[in-house]
Amino acid sequence: MYKKFMIFIIILIIICIGILLFLKLKPNKNTNIIDEYTPEEEISEEEIRKTILSLYFKNKETNTLMPEARSIDVKVLAVNPYLEIFNLLMEGPKSDKLESAIPSGTKVNNAYLVGDVVYLDLSKEFIDNHPGGLENETNTIFSIVNSLTELNEVSYVRILIDGEENLSFNDNNMNFKENFSRAD
């Protein structure tokens, strides 16, 4: 009888251990385990290639610079990002409350990076078609500089006019003798 009692106790212990192990290994209903993520909407190849950049435009009401986010295809930026960003500034903002600070008729002769400085060689229309005044000139320069320095490799911008350095706007309020850094 003692043997039967011991066998019964051993079987009971084994059953209890089995139950405990089963409960321990059983997933908790409150645990959020995701086997596979299924997006609600497929991401297109075109959307994968896009990046968001801030371009700086002049606010029509306050005459201050404001950023406008733009989704840009990285393949377009890969060719010459400095030229592409300047062209986007020339095209103007999407918002009706903003306007381009770049003088009309301005063309880019060349745009290239040396070290961490973007050299932006612009046509003489940049100076000739500018309305003047220190505030407008500052907005024009920093619309360009703040937009280009959104790129990690750019710290400064040097502006040339038809290949010449050390020029200035017509009223001489602001000259291009030195590199411009971001204004925050």
Image (spheres, grey):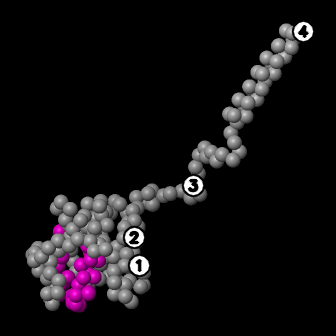
Decide if residue 28 is on the left or right side of residue 16: left
Residue 1, which numbered label?
A: 4
Q: Which mark is in front, 4 or 2? A: 4
Question: Which mark sits nearer the N-terminus, 1 or 3?
Answer: 3
Question: Which mark sits nearer the N-terminus, 2 or 3?
Answer: 3
| Nearest to the observer: residue 36 or residue 74 | 36
Q: Which residues are magenta?
A: 119-145
Task: Give the image location of residue 112, x and y in percent.
Answer: 19, 65
Q: Which residue is mark 3?
A: 39
Q: Residue at x 73, y 30 (%)?
A: 20
Q: Are marks 1 and 2 in contact (CB under 8 Å)?
A: yes
Element type where label 2 sits in the image: strand
Task: Give the image location of residue 11, x and y in percent.
Answer: 80, 18
Among the 4 quarters of the image, the one containing residue 151: bottom left
Q: Which residue is mark 2?
A: 70
Q: Are marks 3 and 4 in contact (CB under 8 Å)?
A: no
Element type where label 3 sits in the image: loop
Q: Which residue is mark 1?
A: 94
Query: Could you classify mark 2 by the number of other residues whose Cα lies within 10 Å: few (under 14), some (14-19), or many (20 or more)?
Result: some
| Quadrant of the rendering where the N terminus is positioned | top right
Q: What whole-number distance in Å separates the C-alpha atoms at marks 1 and 4?
A: 93 Å
Q: What whole-number distance in Å separates the C-alpha atoms at marks 1 and 2?
A: 9 Å
Q: Residue at x 42, y 84 (%)?
A: 96
Q: Identify the residue at the far front of this view.
A: 2
Q: What whole-number distance in Å separates the C-alpha atoms at marks 3 and 4?
A: 65 Å
Q: Which mark is in front, 1 or 4? A: 4
Decide if residue 133 is on the left or right side of residue 13: left
Q: Which mark is in front, 3 or 4? A: 4
Q: Please check the rendered image and state whether residue 136 is part of the magenta-colored stretch, yes or no.
A: yes
